Image (cartoon, rainbow, N blue to C red):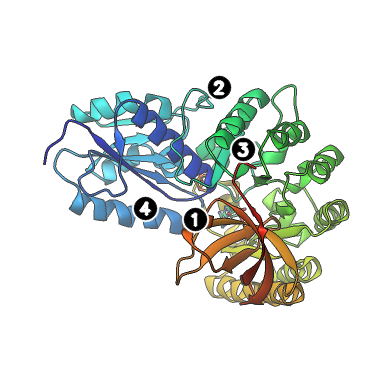
């Protein structure tokens, strides 16, 4: 059946910032009359919003673009957006003849025009940075009814030597506090139960007048907002003001995702992380002293150029000392154009060594988190019911300290808060039982 309404499908790879950008793109195209659809089959416009952080992320996209080429209908427009679009630019048009649009993270305002021109046969690249761009007048089309991502900062100024993000997302800039608060108020009015503020180094937020502490206090004061999170912070930007705001604002959840990257000061130095092992540990101590019951998760890279066995042992010892609730662990992936790729080749860590370190790291993280989680059995938590669990009849919920808890119950609980007792654990996730119906509160209570 033919229809005059054109459809758009957006597929997202990478981090929450990309999810948020996809929501903005969908919102923009919906405002132009496009109907968002859940599948690329038959869609008039297919956008693949990509990640460039590791080679693996890019290979997945390359594979996916091949699939889309085989299944797209004649006349469809395929666009590549996001970090890989920014990184590869015109190379994507050369490599993938069915792609007609390549748009970087600061180019989404022009999407309707770019799409229209592509429909007329044009093939274009739009990868200029725009330091003023926060997409303020876009109304995001949110994928999730329960939780909202609110970007408060774009780009990154840290330039860690392994990282492609400063090149794909450009320099750091913060949104005005009042604009972030307005979006938070709108989200709560729309029934959103939890907000996560996003930025590449979100706690370095500064809009010229207000810092991240001000932002936490202002968003945390939005009436009806019960939970506020943020990701990802940089250890160096946890000022006393920020930690005090976290401790004092009731909505701010007791969880921090605090990327470690390495536990060895000499590796950290070559990564240009700008903190030592001791400074990282001190940051953890300050956060834990101020916020009882704090959940802590992290990111760690193994196999960075020059990482010795002794360096890696230092990483393991930080993991043992801190006892993270969870960790995202990665093998170093060289990214074209980053300083790490210019380090002497004799510093390269062989893949077998990196693989073995990754396995030991994962085991060390698991040993700690399993032991911690066993001590939590029998304790109680308020959880937000997020969605149906992937398997079985259970509901997936999340505690303030970022534990995943599966509970029984029907779909009507999605978007509500309930009190549970933790009754079992796999070592990483929990099962729980609801302890009091009176704890079940409507979303905007
Ligand atoms: N190789 C491996 N992991 C990386 N990360 C960032 N760049 C690289 C890279 N080149 C990891 C870091 C970061 C997370 C989002 O991805 O741990 O915190
Ligand atoms: Fe997000 Fe970084 Fe991947 Fe870009 S490269 S999508 S900023 S994780």
How much space separates mark 4 and mark 3, taking CA atoms? Answer: 23 Å
Q: How crowded is mark 3: few (under 14 residues within 10 Å), some or many (20 or more)?
A: many
Compare residues 87 and 148 and report the one nearer the observer.
148
Question: Image quarter for residue 384?
Answer: bottom right
Q: Would residue 11 be found to the left or right of residue 407 on screen? A: left
Q: Nearer the viewer, mark 1 or mark 4?
A: 1
Q: Residue visible at 33% across and 53% down?
A: 62
Where is mark 4, residue-wise?
A: 61
Task: Identify the residue position indicated by label 2 in the image.
Answer: 132
* 117 is higher (above) or lower (below) than 344: above
Q: Pointer 3: what residue?
A: 156
Which is closer to the viewer, label 1 or label 3? 1
For marks 2 and 1, the one nearer the N-term is 2
Q: Is residue 130 above or below residue 311?
A: above
| Mark closer to the chain start, 4 or 3 | 4
Residue corresponding to mark 1: 412
Residues at circles 4 and 3 in contact by the CB criterion of under 8 Å? no
Query: Split into 4 quadrants, where in the image is the N terminus?
Result: top left
Tell whether label 1 touches label 2 (CB within 8 Å).
Answer: no
Q: Of tags 2 and 1, which is closer to the observer?
A: 1
Q: Distance between the residues labelled 1 and 4?
A: 36 Å
């Amino acid at each position: 059946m033919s229809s005059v309404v054109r459809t758009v499908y957006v597929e997202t790879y990478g981090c929450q910032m990309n999810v948020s950008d996809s929501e903005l793109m969908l919102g923009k195209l919906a405002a132009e009359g496009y109907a968002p659809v859940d599948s690329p089959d038959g869609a008039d416009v297919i956008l693949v919003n990509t990640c460039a952080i590791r080679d693996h992320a890019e290979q997945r996209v390359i594979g996916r673009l091949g699939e889309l080429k085989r299944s797209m209908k004649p006349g469809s427009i395929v666009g590549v957006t996001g970090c890989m679009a920014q990184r590869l630019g015109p190379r994507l048009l050369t490599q993938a003849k069915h792609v007609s649009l390549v748009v970087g993270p600061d180019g989404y305002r022009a999407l309707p025009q770019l799409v229209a021109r592509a429909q007329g046969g044009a093939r274009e690249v739009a990868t200029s940075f725009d330091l003023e761009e926060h997409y303020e007048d876009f109304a995001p089309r949110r994928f999730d009814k329960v939780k909202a991502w609110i970007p408060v900062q774009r780009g990154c100024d840290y330039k860690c030597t392994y990282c492609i993000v400063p090149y794909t997302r450009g320099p750091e800039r913060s949104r005005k506090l009042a604009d972030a608060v307005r979006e938070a108020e709108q989200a709560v009015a729309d029934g959103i139960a939890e907000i996560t503020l996003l930025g590449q180094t979100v706690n370095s937020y500064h809009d010229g007048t207000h810092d991240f502490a001000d932002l936490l206090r202002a968003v945390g004061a939005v009436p009806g907002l019960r939970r506020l999170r943020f990701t990802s912070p940089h250890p160096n930007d946890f000022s006393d003001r920020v930690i005090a705001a976290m401790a004092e604002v009731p909505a701010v959840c007791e969880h921090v995702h605090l990327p470690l990257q390495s536990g060895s000061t000499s590796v950290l130095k070559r990564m240009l992380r700008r903190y030592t092992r001791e400074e990282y540990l001190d940051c953890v101590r300050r956060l834990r002293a101020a916020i009882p019951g704090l959940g802590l998760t992290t990111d760690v890279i193994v196999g960075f150029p020059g990482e010795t066995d002794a360096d890696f042992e230092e990483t393991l010892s930080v993991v043992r000392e801190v006892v993270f609730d969870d960790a995202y662990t990665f093998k170093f992936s060289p990214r074209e154009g980053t300083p790490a790729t210019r380090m002497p080749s004799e510093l390269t860590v062989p893949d077998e060594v990196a693989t073995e370190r990754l396995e030991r790291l994962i085991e060390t993280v698991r040993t700690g988190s399993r032991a911690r989680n066993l001590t939590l059995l029998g304790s109680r938590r308020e959880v937000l019911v997020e969605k149906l669990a992937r398997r079985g009849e259970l509901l997936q919920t999340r505690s303030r300290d970022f534990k995943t808890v599966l509970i029984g119950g029907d779909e009507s609980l999605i978007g509500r808060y309930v009190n549970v007792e933790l009754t079992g654990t796999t070592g990483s996730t929990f099962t729980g039982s609801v302890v009091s119906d009176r704890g079940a509160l409507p979303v905007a209570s």
